[in-house]
Image (cartoon, rainbow, N blue to C red):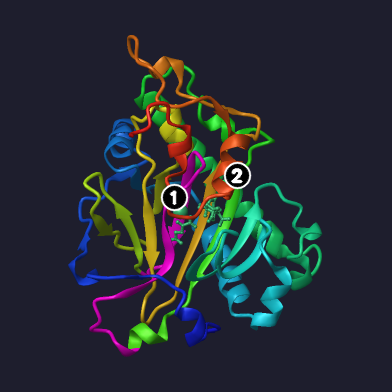
């Protein structure tokens, strides 16, 4: 299933000096069943804004069923998938990411949490009332439950009395969470020239605007994260773990103590990559501001006041690589 032509590839970005990129061997691993999980989560959010979890409690059957549905969907002929598009903002998308000119070697399905999928264009591909929607719901509920458990451990690790201070935002029935399936086909151009030090960008560098992103992928490499010293490191794939990103909103709620991690995906010459990501977001009306219980002494907020609605509106008007929080900083660097 390769639907990209040479003409379109010319508009893609490439990353040079890829052979010099190191692999992150020290990626924090948090075993959710262990008592030290809370402290490890806090440390990882401060240092990397990124970690992986094991013993996550998401049933393997739910994962495998959805993965198999996703493979079936992305294997459909192009014109059939297009019936579920364009993503405005939900639906099937191919190459174009967002509406501001970003392009990547990727096709995807963007779905809303708690969506009535039957009323979406998805039903023009899947038909009405199919089991596929219950597979999707089962997976999303299990992943959201894991996300809430992580957020509650995080609150405990931060010594916050209100254990559900973060998780209640994902549990709210108005929660503005999003679910995304990304498929990165193998890139034939790269397979032909596997000695090249240049790699095609699958999903360009960015931070996620929400609170937390809960990601699982198949066994194909490609994900990279940016460290504090601005170097990029490759994250080895791990079929059995979930990868967790701190999003911009959590960076603000922790008054910059936690890092919203910059990340990107590079295309692969021979294997396709499939990732499934739950972006846990708050209700639109939610004020996003540093938690007063985390402010020490006369510590000031680093950010202006805004709601998730304000931030989302501004984020969706930005390019992928933009520093979206920049507009909301109170002490912006001159
Ligand atoms: C270029 C864009 C795509 C994006 C909306 C935006 O204008 C900037 C943020 C992008 C992002 C990154 C994380 C998630 O994949 C996403 C769904 C989100 O909430 O913000 C995407 C948006 C998108 O693909 O529509
Ligand atoms: O597909 C991936 O592995 C990550 C994609 C991503 O960062 C995103 O969709 O926001
Ligand atoms: Fe992302």
Label 2 CB sits under 8 Å from any ligand 1 atom: no
**In this figure, which residue is indicated by the disc labeled 1?**
322
Q: Using residue 6 as the reference point, say whether residue 132 is left or right of it.
A: right
* Quadrant housing residue 307: top right
Q: Is residue 211 magenta?
A: yes
In the rendered image, which quarter contains the N terminus? bottom right
Q: Is residue 57 above or below residue 203?
A: above
Question: On residue 14, which mark appears?
Answer: none
- At a point 41% along the width and 86% down the height, the residue shown is 188
Sequence-wise first label, 2 or 1: 2
Query: In the shown orientation, is residue 229 left or right of residue 175?
Result: left
Q: Position of residue 265 (x, y in %)?
A: 39, 64
Along the viewing direction, whichever of 279 and 302 lies nearer the viewer: 302
**Residue 273 picture quarter:** bottom left
Are discs 2 and 1 less than 8 Å apart at CB? no
Image coords of residue 274 (percent x, y): 48, 68
| Secondary structure of residue under mark 1 | loop
User: Does residue 230 appear left or right of residue 6 in this picture?
Assistant: left
* Residue at image location 55% in from the left, 62% down from the top: 181
Residue that appears at 60% across and 75% down: 72
Categorize mark 2 by other alpha carbons within 10 Å: few (<14), some (14-19), many (20+). many
Between marks 2 and 1, how big is the CA–CA gap? 21 Å
Q: Which mark is residue 177?
A: 2
Instruction: Out of 250 and 132, give the one closest to the viewer.
Output: 250
The residue located at (50%, 50%) in the rendering is 58
* Few, some or many residues within 10 Å of mark 1 (<14, 14–19, 20+): few
Q: Which residues are magenta?
A: 192-220
- Where in the figure is residue 41, as x and y percent of width and height? 33, 36
Q: Say which element carries label 2.
A: loop
**Vertical comparison of 156 with 132: above or below:** above
Ligand 1: does it lie within 8 Å of the C-beta at label 1? yes
């Amino acid at each position: 299933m390769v639907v990209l032509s040479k003409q379109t590839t010319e508009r893609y970005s490439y990353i040079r000096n890829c052979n010099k990129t190191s692999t992150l061997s020290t990626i924090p691993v948090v075993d959710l069943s262990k008592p030290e999980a809370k402290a490890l989560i806090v440390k990882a959010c401060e240092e990397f804004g990124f970690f992986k979890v094991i013993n996550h409690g998401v049933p393997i059957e739910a994962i495998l069923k959805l993965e198999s549905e996703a493979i079936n969907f992305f294997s459909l002929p192009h014109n059939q998938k297009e019936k579920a598009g364009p993503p405005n903002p939900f639906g099937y998308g191919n190459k174009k990411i967002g509406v501001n000119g970003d392009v990547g070697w990727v096709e995807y399905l963007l779905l809303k949490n708690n969506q009535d999928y039957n009323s979406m264009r998805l039903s023009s591909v899947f038909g009405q009332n199919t089991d596929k929607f219950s597979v999707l719901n089962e997976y999303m509920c299990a992943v959201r439950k894991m996300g809430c458990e992580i957020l509650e451990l995080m609150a405990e690790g931060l010594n916050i009395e209100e254990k559900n201070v973060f998780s209640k935002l994902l549990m709210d029935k108005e929660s503005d969470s999003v679910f995304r399936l990304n498929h990165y086909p193998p890139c034939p151009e790269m397979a032909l020239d596997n000695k090249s030090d240049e790699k095609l960008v699958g999903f360009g560098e960015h931070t996620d605007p929400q609170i937390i992103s809960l990601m699982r992928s198949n066994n194909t490499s490609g994900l990279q994260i940016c460290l504090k010293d601005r170097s990029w490191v490759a994250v080895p794939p791990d079929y059995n773990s979930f990868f967790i990103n701190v999003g911009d909103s959590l960076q603000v709620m922790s008054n910059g103590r936690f890092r919203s991690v910059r990340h990107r995906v590079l295309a692969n010459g021979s294997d396709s990559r499939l990732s499934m990501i739950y972006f846990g977001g708050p209700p639109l009306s939610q004020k996003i501001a540093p938690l007063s219980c985390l402010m020490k002494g006369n510590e000031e907020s680093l950010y202006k006041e805004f709601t998730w609605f304000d931030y989302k509106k501004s984020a969706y008007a930005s390019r992928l690589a933009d520093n979206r929080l920049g507009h909301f900083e109170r002490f912006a660097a001159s």
